[in-house]
Amino acid sequence: MSRPGTITDPRRQRGALTIITPLLLLVIITLSVMVLDGARLYKLRGEMQAQVNVAAQAGASATQSCGGLAASTFLIRQRALAAAQAQGFSGEADALTVRSGVVERGADNVLAFRPVSFIESNAVLVSYTRNEPISLLLPESVFGTLNITVNAAARKEVVATLSAAGSTATVDSGIVGGLLGSVLGDPFYVLDPTSLDSLRNTTVRLGDLLTEVGVADVTALLGLDGQTLAAALRDIGGISSPVGRTLDDLLGAAGLETVQVSDVLEVVEGTQVPASSEFPLYDMLISLVLNVAETQQDALGGFLTVPLDVDLDLGAVANVNASVRLNVGEAPRIVIGPARQDADGNWVTRFYAPDIRLQVLANVQLLSLGGLLSGANVYLPLAVNVGGAEGEFVSARCAVGGVNQVEIGINLNRSVARLGTGTVDTDTGDIIPENGDLDLLGILGLQLLTADVFIAGEVPGIQENNVIISDDYPLYCSDLGCSEDTYQDTGDGVGGLDLDLDLRNVALLGLPLDLSSLLNLLEGLLSDVVEALAGALINPLLESLGIGLGGVTVTVTNADQGGSQVIENVTVVEDN
């Protein structure tokens, strides 16, 4: 049995195609338009991203940590806008939102941008939002619009290694040897000039130091003790070298194991320190020595004796023999960090010259005074409070383009240095006045006159802001090591010593008499002696530690700009 065939009406088929075909064409056209619009929006977003990227990079070069003395929020915005326009940005200037801040790692170890005041900034965030129709061909009333938002943060900063424990070029090996002898308890210790030159001309790479002590980063290094540090420095320098022998000697100092590397080296929190960073070996040695002295001095009555053979021949005026004792109020550190402030308004990278107090016990023989006077014997217990100095890393101009040098600026504050007869209160640093003694002798050696000697003097301090200590420090180190730039501000030096010398309780042959002319002569001679003692002993000793009477020496041994980076669509963390 056969089934009858199905017969379809051609007119019905044509009717269906008439309806379906336009719909299919409409769908195809709509999808094509949407693909084109999607590509257009994707391209637009890419162009916007490129514009905020270059704007953020340009703005970051004018942040506090990178813009030098000319850094400002106005300059950040000006540079960001100019860079965006060069990249094709044609909108209104206020369409770009530009904010200064810092790029830092959050609790999840992911980099984020946190807005802060300009003076704290090392980064710039640029945001850009455009409202675009989803389609240019299809009705906006149907398909609507889309907000496209992009952002980018760029971080740029110079991280510098600074120290105020360096020496001047004229420092004497005998003085540095005496300092070493004082902490070693060896009054006969000698540091030869070759060893001193080696110390002053040697730097240590951080990478070599980390490898030698067997730790991965500088954070772990800071927790080690001074004995480990000194041994590592010795081994890096070579145990048989002049540097190695000196550091090997230092290993015998009592109390070295109680000193921490963090007492010698300070790294500002959050600072990335490259393995290529270098530290001045002399500065590290002086910091170690003074830290050890600080641990030893309490058991020795507050002062360490510095075994220096001080015999000054002042020609026909006087002979001087003196002994020196030293007290450390604060030892210096080498510091690594950027040029910006924290939320409390303090510069994050601060460095200190040592706060030193001296007790100089001088026996002075005034030579022939003419007439019936054969000379005078004077005992002067001189107390010196150097007062210390501090500096702040306040400006850095980043390297740009083909220029690979950076500019480094600091603030300096040098305390008043005081000198007088008496002793030093080791807790406060104040000078407690006491008198010296003068005995005037006749031609037969008979005592003709006695007097109490009182001396009070000071050298003015200095306060300087925005001092450019290097305007072309090279970012890249040669095979011989990194560059070392030294800035020395001598202030008024010994020449600025303002002395007030007074002879009191004067008695001639046991009788109180008016001896104005003779006393003026004696006071003038004694003033000359004290100034000579300051110039020949006190100031050179202090300069070997990086600080003189009224002056300070600052050394930069490394600068790095390797932390520069751009982060697209960065997370913004607002402070509560």
Image (cartoon, grey):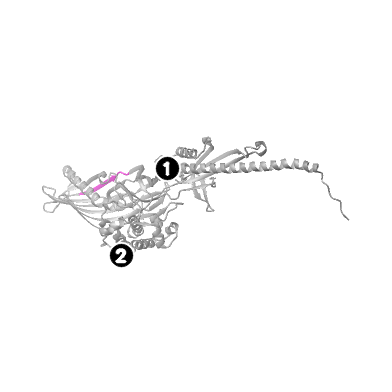
Q: Position of residue 306 (x, y in %)?
A: 28, 58
Q: Nearer the viewer, residue 519 or 461?
A: 461
For the record, the magenta segment spans 451-461
By secondary structure, the bulk of the magenta-drawn segment is best described as strand
Say whether marks 2 and 1 touch (CB < 8 Å): no
Where is residue 145, by image quadrant? top right
Q: Earlier in the sequence, mark 2 or mark 1?
A: 1
Please state which amino acid type lies under the numbered disc 1: Gly
Q: Nearer the viewer, residue 405 or 85?
A: 85
Q: Is residue 374 visible?
A: yes
- In this rendering, the answer to whether 343 lies above or below 137 is below
Q: Is residue 116 magenta?
A: no
Q: Secondary structure at mark 2?
A: loop
Residue linked to disc 1: 67
- Dot 2 crowding, Cα within 10 Å, few <14, some 14–19, many 20+: few
Residue linked to disc 2: 240
Please state which amino acid type lies under the numbered disc 2: Ser
Q: Nearer the viewer, residue 14 or 420?
A: 14
- Dot 1 crowding, Cα within 10 Å, few <14, some 14–19, many 20+: many
